[in-house]
Structure formats: C-alpha cells, structure tokens
Image (cartoon, rainbow, N blue to C red):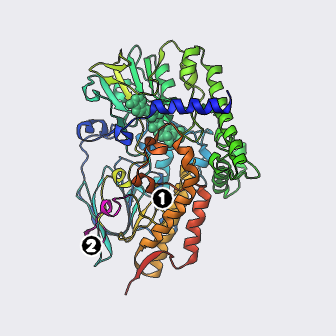
Amino acid sequence: MDTEQVRERYRIEREKRLRGDGLAQFKELKGDYAAFDIDPYVEPGFEREPVIEETDAVIVGAGFGGMLTAVNLQRKGIENFRIVEKGGDFGGTWYWNRYPGCMCDVESYTYMPLLEETGYMPTEKYASAPEIFAHCQRIGRHFDLYPHALFQTEIADATWDDDTDRWTVTTSRGDQLRTRFFITAGGILHKAKLPGIPGIEDFAGTAFHTSRWDYGFTGGSPTEPMDQLKGKRVGIIGTGATAIQAVPQLARAGAEVFVFQRTPSAVGVRNNGPTDEDWYATLEPGWQDERMRNFTQAVTGEQPDIDLVGDGWTDVLWVNTQMGETDEERAELEQVDFEVMERLRQRVSATVKDPATAEQLKPWYGKHCKRVCFHDDYLPSFNEPNVHLVDTDGRGVQQITEHAVVVDGDEYPVDLLIFASGFEVTTSLIQRLGFDPVGRDGLALSERWADGAHTLHGILTAEFPNLMVISTVQAGFGTNFVHFLSESSSHVARLVATCMEQGVASIEATAEAEDEWLMTLFGVAMAMAPYSASCTPGYYNGEGQVTDAGARNVTYPGSLLHYVEFLHEWMDAGDFPGAHVVYRE
Ligand code: NDP
C-alpha cells in the first residue's frame, strides 16, 4: 500500500469507531453497577475502630505511587504519615488485577521499584502479577509501611483550615486525620469502567470486570489453571492489554471463548525468559535508576549510547513521530510509523491461520494512537478450535440480553461474561479521586477546576494549600509508569521535607504560574494534536472528543526526562518560584 492508501484506510477505520457520546459511553462501577465493585480478595465484614490523629502527611493510595511517596518521606526523616487505601493491601493496580495471565509487559528490572533496597531479583524479564503483588508486600514489610496503612478505607472528605494550616481528612470508616500535607497518589488505573452497552444490567449469568476476577466461579487462582471452565461458554468484551493476557488462559482452561472485538490491538513480540542470575549479580549499585533512565531515553527517541533494555518498546517507540521539525522529517517519521505498524500486521498474517480472522485482527492506526501490546500467545489462541473472534467492525457490542451477547443481530449465548473494558484514564481527576477536596474559604476543587485542571507541574494548585497531587493530569508520564512515579514521589517528598525544614505553614501555586505552566504544556501538546486527532478513538485522545476541560487535563506530552528537569530546576531555585508561600510566625 502506498502512503495515501494507508492514510485512507486509517481514516476509514477511525470513522467506523467514532461515536457521539465519547467518554460518556462508559459506566462507573457504582449505583446500578455497584455489585461489580465488590472486592473479591478480602473477607466480608471487616471492621475496625476509627483513627483520630494528627499527622505530617496523609497519602491517598497504596499502589506504587503511594508506597514510593512513603519511602521517599522516610528517606527525608519523615515518619509521621498515614496511607489510606481502598484495597485490602499494598499494590494498587497489582492488588486489583489478579486475572489469569496478568503480567507486566514493561521489563521487570526497570518496572519493579526498589529492587536494590529490598535485595530482590525478579525471576523473569517480564514479571507476572503475583510476583509484582508479592513485591509490593515486600516493600510494605521492608520499609515497615504496614503500621502506617489504613486499608479497606476510602476518603470521605478533605477540607483545608486556614486558621490551623491543616487538612482534616475523614474516611468511610469514621477516621479523622488532621494533617499538614495532603498527598494524593491515586494512580491511573484504579477506577474500572464498564461499557454502556444496552441491556448490560439484564445479563443473568455470572459477569465481572477483569480487575475483580471471581475465581470462585472460574476455579483456579492467578497461579493455577481455572478448572471449572471446561465446556463453559465464556464471552470477553474488549481486546486491550488486559484481554491480550487473559484470552490465552481462558483458551487453555478449555472454555468456548468468544472474544468481542471493537478495535484490534497491535501485538508485538514478547520473548520473555528467566533472569540470568550471573548477569544480575554483576549489576553495580545505582544500576536500577540508570536502567530506568536509559529505558525512558530509548523510548522517547533520545537514543542513549547503549539501549540496555532493547525490547519491543524501544523498537516500536524509538521515534516520536509528531516531533519532526520539517515536512521532510515528518514524512520520514510517518513512513517509519507505517512500517512499524505494517510489521505488526504481518505478524498477524504469519501467526493466525484463518485468513479472514487474521484480517480482522489487524490494527489500522498509527503506532502512537493506542497502547501497543506485547504477547506471544494471544494471536496463536485464535488457531485453537475453542476460541472465536467476534469482530464488531468498530461498532462495539450491540446489546446484552439475559443470556447472550448480540453483535450485528447474531446472539452469542454465554455462561460467563468478562468485561475487559479498561479504566478511566483521561476523565477528570476529581472523578477519579472519588472525593472533592475543599480548599480555602470553602472552595471545592470541582468549582476551581470547573473548566479543567489548574496546576503548577500537575502538583500544586492555587487555593488548595499543601495539597500535592501525583497524577498524570498536567504532569509527566512514561512508558515505564513507575519511573514517573519514582521521580514525582521523590519530588513531592523533597518539597514536603523542605517546607518542614524551612517552617513553611502553607504552599500553593499562584494562578499566574498555573497559566504559565499550561502554556508550556500546550506548547508541546500542539505538535502532537494533529496526530492525535487523526487517531482511532481511545483513552489516549479522550475517545476522539476534544473538550476545553479535557484539553486542560493534558499530560506533559514530551519526554518524562524533560518534565523531571522542570521539577529539578524549580526545587533547585530554592525560593519556590510561582508558589505562594506563607511562613510560620
Ligand atoms: P483498555 O481500555 O485498553 O481496553 C478496553 C477494551 O474494551 C478495548 O478493546 C475497547 O475497545 C473495548 N470496549 C470498550 N467498550 C466496548 C464496547 N461497547 N464493545 C466492545 N468492546 C468495547 O483496557 P485494558 O484493561 O485492556 O488496559 C488498560 C490499561 O491497563 C492499558 O492501556 C495499560 O496501560 C494497562 N495494562 C498494562 C499491562 C501491562 O502489561 N503493563 C497489562 C494490562 C493492562 P476500543 O479499543 O475500541 O475502545
């Protein structure tokens, strides 16, 4: 195909997938769908006495973001902090996601934090979810974080008091925590979503979201085969990074598997293998920070001297397509983009035996439009007689009835319906936090941010003193998300420690600095905009709908390392430029 033909094919596929309701097409796991949100990993009936106390910091979230913030506070000598977490243990996304086959497709040596400190060697280049969850618990034990944690607890309210320079944080378990600093580390994948398919509430069989896997129904466990699925008819809606990993396991369990596809994923080579212990023993202190940095350089096109990780990510994402400065450069980059995606399409043809199924599994969009996946068993699953691809040609599942999934008028009866329908990644921060902080003079964050986010570096916000946000909204991002979390949690801890040392009573962004930061973000984002607009809808581009508020929720689209430079420069300036600071009398 020539360039024009590929562009045209991308345009046609995108148009099929466009719909008027954008992000509103999804349902939250509450209200009518609250049953989907029940935590299957804890014993029901947990109760405890409310905690009433005064602390230096409250951290929301016990995933890697919250844990790294806690560890970084400890490194600064701050021990008086609380961690509040909805789940029943440390882990965040690795607590919730226990679906069969779950693993991390980012290399374990760069992704699993604090390996040097905990003395742990991952068993494989790409670690399984149980191993990562166990590492989260190891971090909890190693750094003695468990006594700080309030699990199975959600924030009810958080209110700033100007007279005492404290936040009062209340929780679903009646806790009252008064704190100097309030740090939210809510993650990007903690709010699961369901597709708003007509009739979804009519389904009478067993149904759950992949992040609430019911092994009681399927049998097995994250490490054992699902022995109760043989002969059962299982439908799975979605073909993103989660489904890619779960489908081969469902196939192995002997179920009749119906994979309902709206947009195919691009699936590259995984090539996992055991860790070479001899090599691991040669790693010098400081190796993990260096490896994280090197990986981020490689995937953002900075071309380090040696590509230490050298896997599919660095191959696929080596070139940042939209960053070409001249027409010629941009044309060249577009060609590279086409070639990478064509290689991935060819991989489908070479793997999937039935030509019609192979055609349906081919991704027709640019390589930065959706998250690329890596797996060696997903595509071969479609050669198994018990695995059936039901392609919806970009339109999605038409309807769900009491016992079946309907596509194009055809009914597919199923006993089990699995929603691999993802998470809210680009909805508003307040919606994802699940509470609405109240800042100075009773101002709610939802009011202040009525037109979208206002922040300095995504961390500080005016009228909300001592609130520090760790999220991707107006902040950085990385293919290795833990690299971003490591950097931003270390920055926040340094900021808290500096404020405490210098007798700062309150710190917040000025509105002017927020505007300036937004202009910096937009300056970089503009280069990306035409590419993003040409993409098939997905969470990367707000489901194809650009709203003013959505635009303000932008993530720093350049390299994570550039974002980190902003943070370092700001801290190193020594006088908190762009912040309004009140010192204690
Ligand atoms: P995604 O949002 O990536 O995928 C959701 C899937 O549901 C898509 O295929 C989507 O189709 C489909 N879908 C939604 N609505 C409908 C509908 N009405 N009819 C049919 N299909 C529908 O969620 P995932 O859980 O797969 O992944 C979320 C993120 O989690 C990933 O992007 C990644 O960041 C992370 N992750 C990381 C892993 C790792 O190895 N590091 C592993 C797993 C997840 P469409 O594409 O058309 O919207």
Which residue is at 35% across, 21% downward? 405
Query: Depth check: 178 or 260 in front?
Result: 260
The image quadrant where one finds the N terminus is top right
CB under 8 Å between discs 1 and 2: no
Number of other residues with Cα within 10 Å of mark 2, as a class: few under 14, some 14 to 19, many 20 or more:
few
Check residue 444 for magenta coloring: yes
Counting from the top left corner in percent of width and height, residue 358 is at 57, 19
On whether ligand 1 comes within 8 Å of the CB at mark 1, the answer is no
Counting from the top left corner in percent of width and height, residue 258 is at 43, 19
Residue 474 numbered tag: 1
Residue 181 numbered tag: none
Residue 160 placement: quadrant: bottom left
Query: Depth check: 490 or 507 in front?
Result: 507
Measured along the vertical axis of the image, is residue 402 above or below residue 31?
above
Number of other residues with Cα within 10 Å of mark 1, as a class: few under 14, some 14 to 19, many 20 or more:
many
Which residue is at 43% across, 81% downward? 503
Q: Residue furthest right?
A: 305
Q: Start and end of the magenta stretch? A: 439-451
Measured along the vertical axis of the image, is residue 543 above or below residue 218?
below
Q: At label 2, which amino acid type do we have?
A: Asp
Which residue is at 72% across, 42% downward? 332
**Is 467 on the left or on the right of 341, as rendered?**
left
Q: Is residue 74 visible?
A: no
Residue 168 placement: quadrant: bottom left
Query: Depth check: 195 or 59 in front?
Result: 195
Measured along the vertical axis of the image, is residue 22 above or below residue 232?
below
Secondary structure of residue under mark 2 = helix
Where does label 2 land, which residue?
441
Query: Depth check: 390 or 52 in front?
Result: 390
Q: At label 1, which amino acid type do we have?
A: Gln
